[in-house]
Amino acid sequence: MQCFAALRRYLFVLVSLWPHPVFAEFINWEGTKKSLFDAKYEIGAAVGGITYLGVKEWNWGSASFKFNDEGWFGMDTGSGGIDKLGHMYSSYLIAEAISNGLSRDNTPEFAATYSALWASSLMLYVEVFDGYSADHGFSYEDVILNSTGVAFSYLRTRYPRVKELLDYRLDYRPSEGMKGFHPVTDYSGMRYLLALKAAGIPALRDTPLKYLEFNLGYSARGFKASDAPYIPERKSELFVGISFNLDELLFKPFADQLGRVGTYASTLSHYYQPRGSYIKTTVHERD
């Protein structure tokens, strides 16, 4: 019940602020309404998914509001910083989904601006209600990484060359301690990678190097109590790697044959990096 009471208070404050002249001066409300209509399915799915996870996985409403200084990537933090990269990825993914919806009938400038607005609002919604969780709390570190993920998506939508050059991907394989598929909270099973695509570099676009991607990645394991029987010590790893650009190798050359399935698979390949699909080497390891 605490969670729903907090939700009512949040919505009341939000609705009471929206018509204020200070906000109206900076935000085009006609554009906001249009963006909501054009991406209603993406925004609705994000709200529903976030609320479900908040109540079921993040214990929203289990405590009074509090702030929480969680730290960054230290080995004495709750997850070695992998949760921070998760916040960046989640906000980035939500912004990308909304921008894809808006891009169907709008300019890149419009799609970039309003996807950033909606994604930032949704991630603020997450953080406010994390403040009512006994397990979490409102974290300014999370807000900063949320904003970073949204900003990266904005740049990719607004400037196509950035999208051609860089992807931010998740590599997830369920860890032993979590006993199941938990791609949002199973930190020990996650790796996050920034992929630099050689095809996005003009000088390499017409060379054999266009099939390659260069990866920078991070993982952290053994920070949860459930990891203890399987990962006795906390470990984190910064690594570099090489993978193949599936768009250049497969999806573009065989677009006609693959059809809609190929289009969906191509989109997925920009956000998910399967384990074993790249070669990596450790740059720095901590335990």
Image: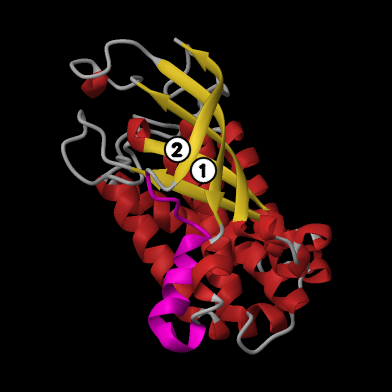
Disc 2, SS: strand
Majority secondary structure of magenta residues: helix
Q: Is residue 196 above or below residue 286?
A: below
Name the residue beneath numbered marker 2: 191
Q: In the image shown, does 155 or 235 lie closer to the viewer?
A: 235
- Answer with left or right where residue 146 lies relative to residue 59: right
Query: Tag 2: Cα neighbours inside 10 Å, few (<14), some, or many (≥20)?
Result: many
Amino acid type for the residue under numbered disc 1: His
Q: Earlier in the sequence, mark 2 or mark 1?
A: 1
Residue 2 percent coordinates (x, y): 31, 45
Counting the numbered discs, the total is 2
Q: Rounded to the nearest whole Å, what is the CA distance between mark 2 and mark 1?
A: 13 Å
Name the residue beneath numbered marker 1: 87
Residue at the front extreme of this rendering = 208
* Disc nearest the viewer among 2 and 1: 2
Q: Is residue 287 above or below residue 281?
A: above
Residue 238 percent coordinates (x, y): 55, 26
Amino acid type for the residue under numbered disc 2: Arg
Residue range (magenta): 255-275
Residue 64 percent coordinates (x, y): 39, 33
Q: Which quadrant of the structure image shows residue 27?
A: bottom right
Disc 1, SS: helix
- Answer with left or right where residue 33 lies relative to residue 28: left
Q: Are marks 2 and 1 in contact (CB under 8 Å)?
A: no
